[in-house]
């Protein structure tokens, strides 16, 4: 019978294909230690017939498996390189910040030193009108005026006839040169025998530094050319 023969032949072909697939799966399973180890023992006992859909699915997994372990390794290597690059960048950034901080610290030290140089040691204000004494110390004009005024007043308590530019006559009608008031430096107490001199270097520095912050001289002191004449005789 042609139909029976065809049907039988088709059935035999199907059986041969199924058997071939099963053998292929078993071979693969034997050769794959991982798969054998992971195999569920419960499934071993359950010898149900294998259906073709399962065979195809498992075979598909087997084909991809050799590639799978390589991908995480490549990704991890790439991540490691990225992290190493980032660490290097952060180290460079850290070095740059360290140098900037060191530079800033130096500038702050210079600024603090400069601020000290332009600050009056008597009134702690900026030396807007600085005058230098023979000892080398510099003070505000106003501070020196006050300091010398005190010395002059005390001197006149002892020598009531003292006048800076005249030589008084004594009780015997003789001109008597009286001693100068004992003017001294407010800091080192060295004797001051001549007029203070305007310190132009400090004056310019004060204006340059103050100008950076928009600060201006608070008030203009009295004309210095006439101020010292009340304390020191004309040369
Ligand atoms: Zn001062
Ligand atoms: Zn001094």
Image (cartoon, grey):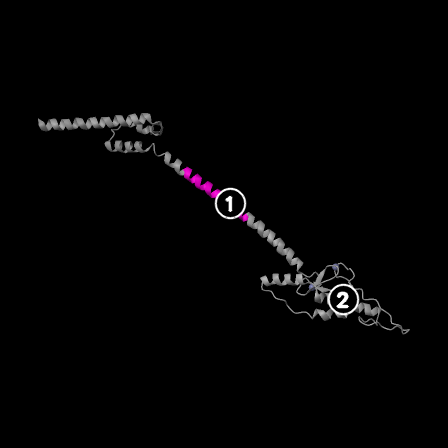
Of the 4 image quadrants, the one containing the C terminus is bottom right
Image height of 51 relative to 149, above or below: above
Whole-percent x, y for residue 143 in the image: 72, 65
Q: What is the magenta range? A: 76-97
Mark 1 = which residue?
Answer: 92
User: Of callouts 2 and 1, which one flags the residue occurring earlier in the amino acid sequence?
Assistant: 1
Label 1 SS: helix
Task: Pick whichever, 198 or 24, lies toward us.
Answer: 198
Q: Residues within 10 Å of mark 1 (few under 14, many from 20)?
A: few
Label 2 SS: helix
Q: Residue at x 42, y 37 (%)?
A: 77
Q: Residue at x 26, y 32 (%)?
A: 56
On residue 148, which mark appears? 2
Q: In which image quadrant can residue 20 be found?
A: top left
Whole-percent x, y for residue 125 in the image: 66, 63
Magenta segment: does it hold 24?
A: no
Question: Which SS type dominates the magenta stretch?
Answer: helix
| C-alpha gap between disc 2 and disc 1 | 60 Å
In the rendered view, does 44 fall on the left or right side of 81? Answer: left
Image height of 85 relative to 123, above or below: above
Whole-percent x, y for residue 229 in the image: 75, 70
């Amino acid at each position: 019978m042609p139909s029976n023969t065809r049907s039988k032949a088709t059935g035999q072909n199907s059986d041969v294909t199924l058997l071939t697939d099963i053998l292929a799966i078993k071979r693969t399973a034997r050769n794959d230690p991982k798969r054998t180890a992971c195999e569920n023992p419960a499934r071993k006992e359950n010898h149900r017939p294998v259906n073709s859909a399962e065979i195809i699915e498992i075979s598909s997994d087997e084909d991809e498996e050799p590639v799978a372990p390589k991908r995480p390794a490549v990704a991890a290597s790439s991540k490691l390189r990225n992290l190493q690059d980032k660490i290097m960048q952060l180290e460079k950034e850290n070095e740059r910040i360290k140098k900037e901080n060191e530079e800033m610290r130096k500038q702050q030290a210079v600024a603090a030193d400069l601020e000290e140089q332009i600050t009056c040691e008597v009134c702690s204000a900026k030396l807007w009108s600085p005058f230098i004494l023979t000892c080398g110390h510099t003070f505000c004009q106003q501070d020196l005026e006050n300091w010398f005024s005190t010395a002059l007043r005390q001197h006149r308590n002892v020598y009531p006839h003292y006048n800076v530019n005249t030589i008084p006559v004594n009780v015997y009608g003789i001109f008597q040169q009286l001693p100068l008031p004992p003017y001294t430096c407010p800091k080192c107490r060295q004797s001051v025998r001549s007029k203070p001199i305007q310190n132009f270097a400090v004056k310019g520095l004060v204006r340059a530094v103050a100008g950076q912050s928009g600060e201006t001289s608070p008030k203009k002191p009295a004309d210095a050319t006439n101020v010292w004449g009340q304390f020191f005789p004309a040369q």
